[in-house]
Image: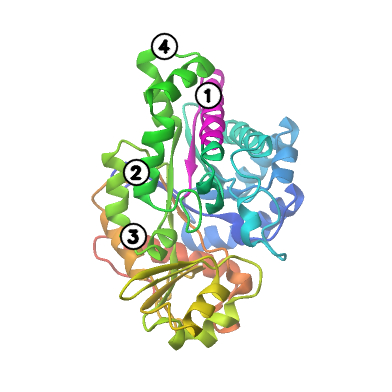
Amino acid sequence: MRLEGLPGRPHLTYCTNIHAGETWPEIGASLDAHVPRIKERVSPDAPLGIGLRLSAAAAATLADPREIDGFRDQLERLGGYVFTINAFPYGPFHGTRVKERVYEPDWRTEERSAFTEATSGILAALLPEGGYGSISTVPGGFRTLRGDPAAVEAVAERLLSSVAGFVDLERRTGRTVALALEPEPWCLIETADEAAGFFERFLLGREALERFALRARLPGPQVEAAVRRHLGICYDVCHGAVQFEEPVRALRTLRAAGIGVPKVQLSAALRVPDGGAGGRRDLERLDTGTYLHQVVAKGRRTERFRDLPEAFAALDAGGAEGEWRVHCHVPVFLDDLGGLASTQDDLCSTLRALQGEFLSPHLEVETYTWDVLPPHLRTASKADDIARELRFVLDGLNDDGQRDP
């Protein structure tokens, strides 16, 4: 839905990665199952934005023009529209061990760029004439890439090659699509400061821009502007909070560096004020083996752990002191999680800033962990919980600050 009262009139949606389904028929069926109820509760009189999550397999199917035509008909029937796609997970995202595999294939590979090219064509076909769309993606790859300078250079080169394709897509269709790298703990790019540094060093240097100009067939004065228009950051408030990064400051850092933020994901992480010792039993229940739960512990010093088992081992050895932040997307309307807390305050500060600042054209609620949360944290049907999250965000964007009880 379009938020007419905010600077820049951004669009708000939720990400459909909450729904299980890897094939296009499964994804389409999940939209039919959930969108009508969500729209009824959140946007009964206006089109509902849908943040479409596509796997590589689903994108390969939907890229068929006949399938796209059928999807347009479905969207019209549902009263929805698509302005953003989540192309981060390449393969299965529910019901199996995801962990580090969610970052594979990384941005060194042809598979990743081909998947992104397919989703960009789909999005352009769904946008209105002159429309603007965003695609969120892996922030290069997993953290192990940091030790290999050649791998980092390869990531940057493939990103620029894909962005050149986005320039050509705009020429052919009149639609602008922006690729948005999503910083995440234990990835090549983890924070806003690291994102700014990566852009400056690998994407906006003189030699990189010269190579990009040849690929994109652009004259010199237009080259840097084209990179900045078609490549930016998807800022996930949960991910920033795990890093103890103040989200509004981070967004302003990116803006000051001239780096676009095509999408902000409105989300909350787990917070354990008294550290792992106080919340260990509750945290162990979350460690189902499906998702990676990166941990940052901040006491007399800051320690970072790849996953909960490593954090528990450090705790047993006398480390991991202070407050813990855990990468687990939790319902944004809950601040008391039965022994644990959330980083809801970081989200609320972001919502307050959005009342007066244009920080991003696309806002997306992204809580994808409902199926692995303990039963006491699941408060209603999935559609009702999604609607409640969207209403919480809408209330937080109002001047009076009233929230859905």
Q: Which residue is mark 2?
A: 9
Crowding at dot 4, Cα within 10 Å, few <14 / some 14-19 / many 20+, comes out as few
Q: Are marks 2 and 3 in contact (CB under 8 Å)?
A: no
Query: In the image, what residue occupies the spot 53% across and 65% down?
Result: 306
Q: Quadrant of the C terminus?
A: bottom left
Crowding at dot 2, Cα within 10 Å, few <14 / some 14-19 / many 20+, comes out as some
Instruction: Indicate which disc, 1 or 3, sits on the residue closer to the N terminus.
Output: 1
Residue nearer the viewer, 284 or 371: 284
Q: Which residue is mark 3?
A: 245
Crowding at dot 1, Cα within 10 Å, few <14 / some 14-19 / many 20+, comes out as many
Crowding at dot 3, Cα within 10 Å, few <14 / some 14-19 / many 20+, comes out as some
Q: Amino acid at mark 3?
A: Glu
Q: Which residue is mark 4?
A: 219
Query: In the image, what residue occupies the spot 62% across and 58% down?
Result: 100
Q: Give the main secondary structure of the magenta stretch.
A: helix
Q: Are marks 4 and 3 in contact (CB under 8 Å)?
A: no
